[in-house]
Image (tube, rainbow, N blue to C red):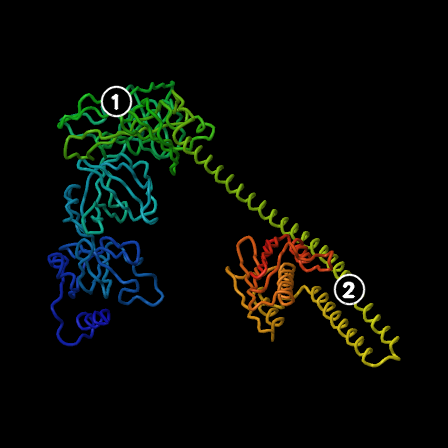
């Protein structure tokens, strides 16, 4: 909706067929810059005619337009084309060139730093000369008032096209007495760049600011359209080494004359080198860092002659854009022994006293190795020295065989180049003081162990205890596992033994049952049949006698057969093993007792303590037969009024108790197998087969109590 309204506004205000009178519009860059930021942000209509001073490099970067009153940045939409541009033509941004006279119509914008134009239409009117450049110094540019203005600077080129900007433009660096400035040249290459380095030049270009996300000025650079805007005032020396030589100890000395901006040469011995980046040069006790793009290898100890620019980007001077060549003679630099306190000195509140100047010099520091950690470039070491931690860096990984000898806690001597850190950057706002330093090591051999720490450190002790504890836990787990396996095997073996023993017991019980059945049949059935045969024979002999005598013997034969039938039934009953028929023992006892005592008038009760459990058929069946035997005996001999059956389930045994309130008997006088009575003896044998205990308590007139105790795990 907002875009539609803006388009409608442009049609009404700027279109060739507007409706009504055209309202007042902003017509100059100066008028736009005089607007308060809040007003510029409202999108006020404008129409400005001027010359393109910087055409930009991308379709969304915009360009800079100068109408003679003020330069202003123009932001264009990606699809915006100059009036009359045919369809399919090249991008209008690419078509724009410095010096084109154009008319821009659009809306005002606050911009991120300064007011700008939001272009809605663009017309190319022709070509025109660029506005004149105003001579300035860098400190004036850093105020921001020359943003988007053509300015002229004078200085010495230190770098000519050594780097690129957005892959379409070249970067040049110029230094002046007031500071450095970066120049962006609208060419990918700089012809004769080597001859431009160290030349004194005058440069005309557009001042462009770059700023923070808050819109605060952070720096400036000059945008130059061609080499024609760079005028060589004083050519560079043909030989870069044909320049005055200075001492490393006097890089930026005091002088009532302005400091030279041109190359200087110095010589010394290489103490550390990183090809293509920088190296350290030392002569005597003073060292300096030298920045170079020259990628020749410089072994430690090489003597070189350096030609470069003296820079003061931090309180200690450095050499930049340097070239070098190796000179004859071998150089040897002895490391200076230092302590942390000697480097830091004593700060009195105004200046540092008793400090040893070793920045950039080769030094040797003793300390205790606390920690090592890998970095992207190599390894970082932390050494305790003088009651504080000092950091040492090496630009490659330490070999494994060397690491094995570097135990934490060992005393070490480190040899490397000292790089100090100061409290203030340049230019300082107060007296600079050294707040810390780090050592740049050259090779693993720069780490010398003076006292090897004991292997038995607190960390190793902790690891050993952890290992022992882990072994103990594993052993305990293994022991528990083995114990569980043994218990499982023992349980399985016990189950097998019980099953085997139960099978043996059952087999023996079957044999004994057969023997008992044979004895029962022999003692009952055979005798009964003999008696019946005798009675029948007697009847045959008395066939001629009165019938009353034959009836008497027939009655006796019937009685004998009836008793024999009961004995046979009892013997067959004792053979049954699966008598529970899905019932628990208490329910089965109640069912059997109810059947035996039906119609007798004898009261029967069942009970017991403990939750009932499933019992093996052998145990349950024999207990049931023991209970039946007790009930039958009570019916035959005791004449009870009540019988009570009690089954108690305990963790390790089952107890069956049968009590009656009958006449009782004298246990000592009870008849046994010798008198033809096998009841009590059979009960004892049955309990013995179950591995249980049988207890019979009875006295004449006091009833009978029978207790059978059996282990259910048998």
**Residue 289 image position (x, y, % from top left):** 30, 29
**Secondary structure under the numbered disc 1 in the rendered image:** loop
Mark 2 or mark 1, which is nearer the start of the sequence? 1
Find the residue positioned furthest to the bottom: 547
Residue 537 visible somewhere in the drawing: yes
User: Alpha carbon of mark 1 to alpha carbon of mark 2: how far?
Assistant: 138 Å
Q: Residue shown at 33%/61% (left/top)?
A: 91
**Residue 14 image position (x, y, % from top left):** 19, 69
**Residue 641 image position (x, y, % from top left):** 56, 69
Q: Which residue is mark 1?
A: 247
Nearer the observer, 570 or 195 = 570
For residue 671, what is the image quadrant? bottom right
Q: Which residue is mark 2?
A: 521
**Secondary structure under the numbered disc 2 in the rendered image:** helix
For residue 615, what is the image quadrant? bottom right
Q: Residues within 10 Å of mark 2 (few under 14, many from 20)?
A: some
Quarter of the rendering occupied by the N terminus: bottom left
**Is 564 situated above or below 142?**
below
Q: Nearer the viewer, mark 1 or mark 2?
A: 2
For residue 35, what is the image quadrant? bottom left
**Residue 56 image position (x, y, % from top left):** 27, 54
Q: Residue shown at 57%/71% (left/top)?
A: 602
Q: Is residue 520 left or right of residue 211?
A: right
Nearer the observer, 515 or 679 = 679
Q: Is residue 230 left or right of residue 633?
A: left
Nearer the observer, 666 or 434 = 666
């Amino acid at each position: 909706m907002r875009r539609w309204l803006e388009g409608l506004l442009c049609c009404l205000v700027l279109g060739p067929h507007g409706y009504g009178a055209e309202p007042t519009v902003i017509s100059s860059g100066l008028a736009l810059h005089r607007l308060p930021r809040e007003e510029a942000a409202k999108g006020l209509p404008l129409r400005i005619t001027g010359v393109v001073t910087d055409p930009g490099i991308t379709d969304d970067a915009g360009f800079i337009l100068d109408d003679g009153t003020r330069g202003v940045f123009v932001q264009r939409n990606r699809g915006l084309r100059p009036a009359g541009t045919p369809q399919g033509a090249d991008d209008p941004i690419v078509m724009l060139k410095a010096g084109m006279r154009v008319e821009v119509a659009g809306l005002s914008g606050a911009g991120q730093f300064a007011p700008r134009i939001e272009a809605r239409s663009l017309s190319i009117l022709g070509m025109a000369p660029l506005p004149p450049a105003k001579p300035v110094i860098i400190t004036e540019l850093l105020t921001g008032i020359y943003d988007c203005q053509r300015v002229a600077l004078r200085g010495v080129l230190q770098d000519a096209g050594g780097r690129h900007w957005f892959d379409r433009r070249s970067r040049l660096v110029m230094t002046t007495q007031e500071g450095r400035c970066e120049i962006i040249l609208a060419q990918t290459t700089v012809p004769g760049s080597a001859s431009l380095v160290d030349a004194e030049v005058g440069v005309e270009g557009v001042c462009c600011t770059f700023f923070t996300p808050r819109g605060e000025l952070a720096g400036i650079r000059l945008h130059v359209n061609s080499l024609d805007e760079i005028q060589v005032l004083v050519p560079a020396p043909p030989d870069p080494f044909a320049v005055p030589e200075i001492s490393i100890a006097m890089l930026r000395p005091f002088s009532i004359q302005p400091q030279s901006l041109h190359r200087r040469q110095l010589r010394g011995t290489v103490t550390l080198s990183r090809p293509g980046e920088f190296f350290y040069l030392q002569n005597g006790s003073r060292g300096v860092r030298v920045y170079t793009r020259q990628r020749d290898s410089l072994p430690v100890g090489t003597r070189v002659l350096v030609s470069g620019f003296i820079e003061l980007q931090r309180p200690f001077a450095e050499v930049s854009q340097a070239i070098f060549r190796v000179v004859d003679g071998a150089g040897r630099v002895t490391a200076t022994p230092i302590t942390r306190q000697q480097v830091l000195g004593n700060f009195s509140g105004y200046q540092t006293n008793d400090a040893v100047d070793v920045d950039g010099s080769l030094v040797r520091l003793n300390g205790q190795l606390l920690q090592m950690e890998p970095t992207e470039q190599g390894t970082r070491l932390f050494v305790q020295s003088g009651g504080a931690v000092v950091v040492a860096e090496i630009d490659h990984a330490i070999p494994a065989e060397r690491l094995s000898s570097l135990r934490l806690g060992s005393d070490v001597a480190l040899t490397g180049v000292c790089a100090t850190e100061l409290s203030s950057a340049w230019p300082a706002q107060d007296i600079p003081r050294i707040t810390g330093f780090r050592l740049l090591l050259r090779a693993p051999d720069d780490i010398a162990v003076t006292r090897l720490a004991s292997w038995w450190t607190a960390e190793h002790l902790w690891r050993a205890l952890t290992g022992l504890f882990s072994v103990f836990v594993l052993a305990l787990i293994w022991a528990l596992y083995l114990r569980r396996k043994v218990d499982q095997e023992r349980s399985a073996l016990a189950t097998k033994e019980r099953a085997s023993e139960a099978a043996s017991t059952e087999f023996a019980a079957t044999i004994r049952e057969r023997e008992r059945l044979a004895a029962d049949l022999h003692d009952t059935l055979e005798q009964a049949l003999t008696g019946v045969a005798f009675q029948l024979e007697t009847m045959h002999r008395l066939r001629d006698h009165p019938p009353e005598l034959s009836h008497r013997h027939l009655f006796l034969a019937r009685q004998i057969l009836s008793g024999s039938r009961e004995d046979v039934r009892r013997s067959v009953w004792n053979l049954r093993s699966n008598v529970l028929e899905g019932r628990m023992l208490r329910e089965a006892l109640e069912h059997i007792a109810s059947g035996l005592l039906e119609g007798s008038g004898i009261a029967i009760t069942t009970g017991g303590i403990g939750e009932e459990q499933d019992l093996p058929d052998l145990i349950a069946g024999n207990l049931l037969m023991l209970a039946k035997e007790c009930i039958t005996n009570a019916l035959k001999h005791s004449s009870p009024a009540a019988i009570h059956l009690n089954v108690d389930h305990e963790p390790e045994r089952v107890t069956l108790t049968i009590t009656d309130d009958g006449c009782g008997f004298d246990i000592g006088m009870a008849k046994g197998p010798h008198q033809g009575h096998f009841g009590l003896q059979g009960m004892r044998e049955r309990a013995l087969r179950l591995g249980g205990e049988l207890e019979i308590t009875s006295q004449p007139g006091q009833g009978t109590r029978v207790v059978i105790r059996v282990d259910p795990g048998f």
